[in-house]
Image: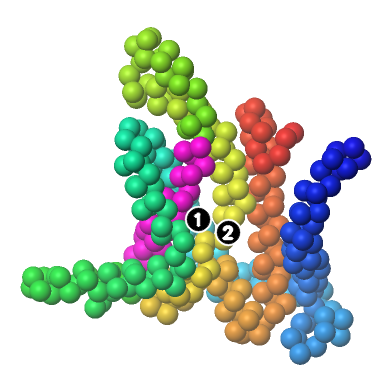
């Protein structure tokens, strides 16, 4: 109570944000009840009939469209974890090695910029560069070389999505790693240099251990969000490659639930996805505690 009285001004300032969080996130969770109902948008939730676990049969029954969406989601998750997650770490290490402060700030500003572009703009840029009538193919035609089918090629869709994510978000994601690098005691580097450690050994024994906490924290959060691989980014390009190559769980919920009017089944899929994400976060956090790290919350 003493702390509450002391911080009453800050608490009052935080109340609108807390109220929005409670109303639009926690109270809205009650809407998941439609996963057990034959929901119709023109009826209230109370008026809709109960159907029990029937809506979950789209998951347990092995629906081919749903299984295809799960497979594509897992493939994208693995690829983006391998290539997207380490990219900010590598970029932060490279930026941290730049000695000229002015050059570093200019490079950081340029790399941060794509993060503030919407996916509509990012997809349009890639289409203008890599599309059939884009800059790349226009240049190849001028040179008398065969054009490349990149944007509409289902076999290259995963690589295209991954490259877009790397281009858009890698620069912005370096902020946390640069902050962690700034907190590493310079005396550790001096001591290691006196002991004859090379730059490579300083990286392995000083820099990476200093980043371990933030890396584990972000990896835990990444696992919790692993089944979300970019709804807006994919739905904007789905028509170019077809549903078979691009359908993921989020687009399946939209196409099957909103467009196909299977609201209850879509809610069931979304609910199961959320539960799996929660279990992954809790499990990964427990593993982090076993390795002596704080994780998302303290043990």
- The image quadrant of residue 290 is top right
Question: Is residue 258 one of those drawn in magenta?
Answer: no
- Disc 2 marks which residue? 227
- Disc 1 marks which residue? 77
- The image quadrant of residue 262 is bottom right
Relative to residue 41, is residue 14 depicted above or below? above
Q: Earlier in the sequence, mark 1 or mark 2?
A: 1
Residue at horizontal 79%, vertical 66%?
Answer: 23
Residue 273 position in % (x across, y down): 65, 61
- Given residues 147 and 24, the one toward you in this image is 24
Residue at horizontal 60%, vertical 48%?
Answer: 221
Find the magenta span and give its range: 155-179
Question: Is residue 156 one of those drawn in magenta?
Answer: yes
**How dense is the environment of label 2, judged by Cα within 10 Å: few (below 14), some, or many (20 and up)?**
many
How much space separates mark 1 and mark 2, taking CA atoms?
7 Å
Secondary structure under the numbered disc 2 in the rendered image: loop
Residue 217 position in % (x across, y down): 59, 40
User: Can the viewer see residue 228 in this picture?
Assistant: yes
Residue 174 position in % (x across, y down): 46, 45
């Amino acid at each position: 109570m003493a702390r509450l009285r002391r911080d009453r001004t800050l608490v009052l300032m935080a109340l609108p944000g807390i109220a929005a969080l409670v109303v639009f996130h926690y109270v809205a969770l009650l809407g998941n009840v439609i996963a057990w109902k034959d929901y119709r948008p023109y009826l209230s939730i109370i008026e809709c009939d109960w159907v029990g676990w029937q809506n979950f049969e789209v998951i347990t029954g092995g629906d081919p469209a749903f299984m295809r969406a799960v497979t594509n989601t897992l493939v994208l998750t693995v690829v983006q974890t391998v290539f997207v997650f380490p990219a900010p770490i590598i970029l932060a290490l490279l930026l941290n090695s730049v000695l000229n402060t002015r050059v570093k700030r200019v490079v950081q500003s340029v790399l941060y910029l794509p993060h503030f572009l919407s996916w509509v703009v990012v997809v349009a840029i890639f289409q203008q560069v890599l599309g059939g009538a884009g800059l790349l193919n226009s240049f190849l035609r001028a040179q008398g070389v065969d054009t490349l089918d990149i944007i509409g090629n289902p076999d290259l869709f995963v690589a295209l999505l991954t490259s877009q994510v790397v281009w858009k978000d890698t620069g912005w994601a370096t902020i946390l790693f640069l902050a962690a690098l700034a907190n590493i005691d310079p005396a550790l580097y001096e001591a290691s240099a006196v002991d004859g450690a090379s730059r490579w050994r300083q990286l392995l024994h000083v820099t990476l251990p200093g980043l371990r906490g933030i890396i584990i924290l972000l990896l835990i959060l990444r696992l919790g969000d692993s089944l979300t691989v970019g709804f807006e980014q994919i739905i904007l390009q789905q028509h170019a490659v077809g549903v078979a190559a691009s359908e993921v769980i989020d687009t399946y919920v939209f196409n099957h639930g909103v467009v196909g009017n299977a609201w209850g089944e879509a809610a069931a899929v979304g609910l199961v996805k959320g539960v799996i994400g929660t279990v992954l976060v809790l499990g990964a956090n427990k593993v982090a505690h076993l390795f002596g790290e704080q994780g998302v919350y303290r043990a």
